[in-house]
Amino acid sequence: MIELEGLERRYGERVALAGVTVSVGEGETLSVLGSNGAGKTTLLRVLATLLRPHAGTVRVLGAELPGEAWKVRGQVGLLGHEPLLYLDLSARENLRYHARLHGAGRGRVEEVLAAVGMERRGDEPVRELSRGMVQRVAAARSVLHDPPLLLLDEPRAGLDPAAAELLEPLIGRASGRTRVLVTHDVERGKAEADHVLALKGGRAVELEEAYR
């Protein structure tokens, strides 16, 4: 599902990722760990086709990036720090908009709203919802099109334990999807992972070194 070999990405002269090599199979979870500025979010953005790699080989779902990025975009669910929702629209309106982009029906919108426990609050503007509710709607958006690959950047941020449990069937290991999980929760990241990638200064290191 994901094959990286010698991935490099720079911001001007600053190296954000250097020589990253990893392979993730179908249904597996890769946990990406490391301190702030280690390159974790940059890696997700490359996989999501939002940033172009500067060197190395990047294959996602069998497509080589950046040349075949168009093959990937409709098959990836991204849940990051930004909810990617229009604040003046309701949760339901946001999801209907995304459903039209992906060719999903209104029935699917209602299905994911119910799955995140937001069907009764679905007609309220997003800007009036709590942070945790916005995160639940964002999670619904990320799986609306039933993507085989989820890219998750601190997906449980702002969620209480009950809400986090509610999302488990959609974005957790129980979903059966291939996942790349960025988290500061080292123990949880290790527990959920089939593979662990620890980054420091954009390079893969041993986990203990990542936090020194």
Image (cartoon, rainbow, N blue to C red):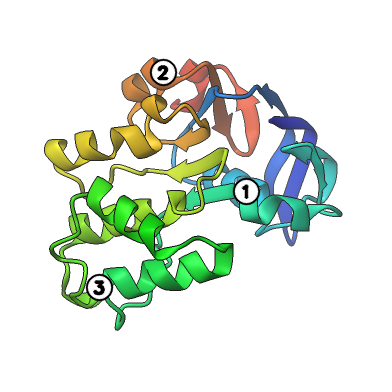
Q: State the residue at coordinates (45%, 73%).
A: 97
- Left or right position of 167 against 19: left
Label number found at residue 197: none
**Quadrant into which the C terminus falls:** top left
SS type, badge 1: helix
Q: How far apart are marks 2 and 3 (CA)?
A: 33 Å
Label number found at residue 126: 3
Q: State the residue at coordinates (82%, 51%).
A: 54
Relative image position of residue 7 (x, y in whole percent)? 77, 38
Relative image position of residue 123 (x, y in whole percent)? 20, 74
Query: In the rendered structure, are the residues bearing label 2 and label 1 in contact, judged by CB atoms less than 8 Å apart?
Result: no
Indicate the amino acid at tag 3.
Val
**Residue corresponding to mark 1:** 75
- Left or right position of 25 against 189: right
Q: State the residue at coordinates (40%, 55%).
A: 108
Callout in the foreground (1, 3): 1
- Left or right position of 181 against 185: right
Compared to 187, does 99 lie above or below?
below
